[in-house]
Amino acid sequence: MSRSGVLCVGSTIVDVAKVIDHYPEQERLTLIRDVSLSTGGPALNLAVDLRRLHAPFPLGLVGVVGDDAHGRLVREACVELDIDASGLRTAPGVATSFTDAMVVRDGGSRTFFHHQGANALLGVEDVDLAGSGAKILHVGAPGLHPRLDAPIDDGGNHWATLLRAAQSVGLLTTMELVSLPAAQIREVALPCLPHLDFLVINEIEAAALTGVSIEPLDADGRLDWSAYESIASRLVELGVSRLAVVHFPAGCVGAAPGGLLWRRGSVHLPRSSVRNATGAGDAFAAGVIYGLHEELPVDQCLRLGVCVAAASLQGAGTSDGVLPVAECLALGDEHGFRATSGPTAPRRPEPGGRGGQ
């Protein structure tokens, strides 16, 4: 069958962003300057961001919400953005999952307080793979869904079962993570890697999976690009079959089988333009996955990823800064990209099949 679209499965959350003057010490107070509600979670965010990019393909969401105001907000957003929510189940007597994001006004650094809520009820049986015509299955995020996180007899977990089943019926697979403790990330995500075509995660999550110790840097910190390439390459060795992408404030790297490597610096957005970094990682993933779906070369996928992330940084909420593709790319043209200094591996022809992936 001819497949098209992205089916997004997993974390369906409402983000409650609270802009504060500074993060206080315990037993101390800081002022909340602004409060905003927006859709959130790696599954829902990807669907919303892809539609805000004006993706020309179908989008579907599978998850669980409560019968409450937050659940209604999620459903209203899906209707408004033409996201198929037929796979979104409402569970009575439980709260829709939400995250309080404390955002420091100067610079946008964030601290998260998460309530698992209805996400804890999502299981493999909620996902109708046989009835889906999607091209890509996107899942997120292992570690926040107890039923899917649970180990099974073969040493894997129910996420791995779902990904394996998706590949068996012809879907490409992707996964996002959230920055949980390293041991927990390894426990839930490592069994999934052999069943992934693509992986798009940040440097903290990638370091956790590969057992590498890194010091997170801001966008203008001096970093060893080759070290980040090694981390991405290790993810391929651990099972990612087509492309592993690691993003961080200064940009991103990609790795594919055969020693293929890519680098892309982030958009040199003025600090004064950064309003809120909540959702920027999901926005980056949306840009990359848009390109993968449309079978663009990897370097174009990474360029779109950093441009969509830059657009997201200018918004007050999780997704409201994301613009149509051409407008996101124009931000890169306007502000330029950070340098990716240092040697990299020699280029080879991209692997064949589905747009070089």
Image (cartoon, rainbow, N blue to C red):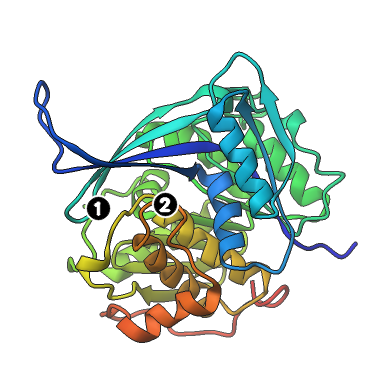
Disc 2 packing (10 Å; few <14; some 14–19; many ≥20) = many
Left or right position of 29 against 14 = left
Upstream in sequence: badge 1 or badge 2: 1
Name the residue rendered at 58%, 45% in the picture: 43
Q: Give percent across and percent down for residue 51.
A: 61, 61
**Residue under circle 1?**
108
Name the residue rendered at 20%, 56% in the picture: 107
Left or right position of 247 against 242 = left
User: Which image quarter holds the N terminus?
Assistant: bottom right
Q: In this view, does 325 lie above or below 177?
A: below
Q: Give percent across and percent down for residue 16.
A: 39, 37
Check disc 2 and report its element: helix, strand or loop: loop
Q: Give percent across and percent down for residue 314.
A: 34, 63
**Residue under circle 2?**
279
Q: In this view, does 27 lie above or below 238?
A: above
Q: In which quarter of the image is residue 356?
A: bottom right
Q: How many labels does the image show?
A: 2
Name the residue rendered at 55%, 28% in the picture: 69
Looking at this view, name the residue that lies furthest to the top: 93
Is any part of residue 335 visible from this angle? Answer: yes
Label pair 1/2, CB-CB below 8 angstroms? no
User: Which image quarter holds the C terminus?
Assistant: bottom right
The amino acid sitting under disc 1 is Gly
The amino acid sitting under disc 2 is Gly
Q: Give percent across and percent down for residue 321.
A: 42, 61
Q: In this view, does 250 lie above or below 108?
A: below
Left or right position of 286 against 89 = left
Disc 1 packing (10 Å; few <14; some 14–19; many ≥20) = some
Left or right position of 240 against 186 = right
What whole-number distance in Å separates the C-alpha atoms at marks 1 and 2?
11 Å
- Using the image as rendered, state which of residue 301 and residue 104 is in the foreground: 104
Q: In which quarter of the image is residue 224?
A: bottom left
